[in-house]
Amino acid sequence: MNRFVIVCESLTGNTAILAEALRAHLQTENIHITTPVLADTDSSDVFFVGSWTDKGDCGANTAAFLEKLEHKKVFLFGTCGFGRSDAYYDTVYRRFADHLKPTNQIIGHYICQGKMPETVLRRYEAMKAANPDCSRWDECIDNYRNALSHPNADDMQSLFEAVDAALETIKAKT
């Protein structure tokens, strides 16, 4: 059995960036990153599960994987294009967590902003053109531009701090 397994579903590559950084940070031998479709629920007692955000929730494959877990320690992480607020990230985290059975223990979580495909910007620009008096589209375009630099070094550091705190919790209980 592996000590840790990282399970990652990444649509645009943002969550995969976090997963790779997490693997390097953990510095354990033979830690591997797998997808929710290929992940074996019996391969570890500790899972770091990351996902992109789909309409405020994790990807469908991640949801299905989380629903299969029983009696595991789980750290949830992910990225979302929209947000830029801890309150929104907490809402996303709670939706991810809702897929877990109560027999699991959530040891920590981290959600941050991630860049979005250019098609999103084009959609926002089209909506602004169709509704020039609506300031919502200006906010969406500003959010898109801010997201282009994420995940960044500060996001990685915050992820590492959350993971280190989670691992300390595990050590303290053993």
Image: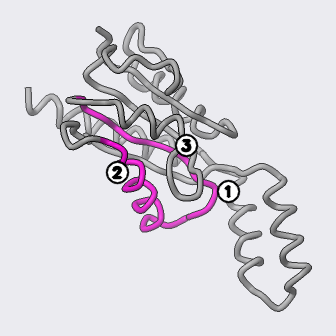
Q: Earlier in the sequence, mark 1 or mark 2?
A: 2
Helix, strand or loop at label 3? It is loop
At 55% from the left and 47% from the top, the residue drawn is 79
At 29% from the left and 15% from the top, the residue drawn is 3
Q: Earlier in the sequence, mark 2 or mark 3?
A: 3
- Mark 2–mark 3 CB contact (< 8 Å): no
Q: Which residue is mark 1?
A: 147
Residue 88 placed where, x, y %? 47, 65
Whether residue 170 sits left or right of residue 160 in the image: it is left
User: Circle 1: is it few (<14), some (14-19), or many (20+) Cα within 10 Å?
Assistant: many
Q: Is residue 13 above or below residue 31?
A: below
Q: Is residue 88 magenta?
A: yes
Amino acid residing under circle 3: Gly
Q: Which residue is mark 3?
A: 59
Amino acid residing under circle 1: Ala
Start and end of the magenta stretch? 72-100
- Is the N terminus in the top left, top right, bottom left or bottom right quadrant? top left
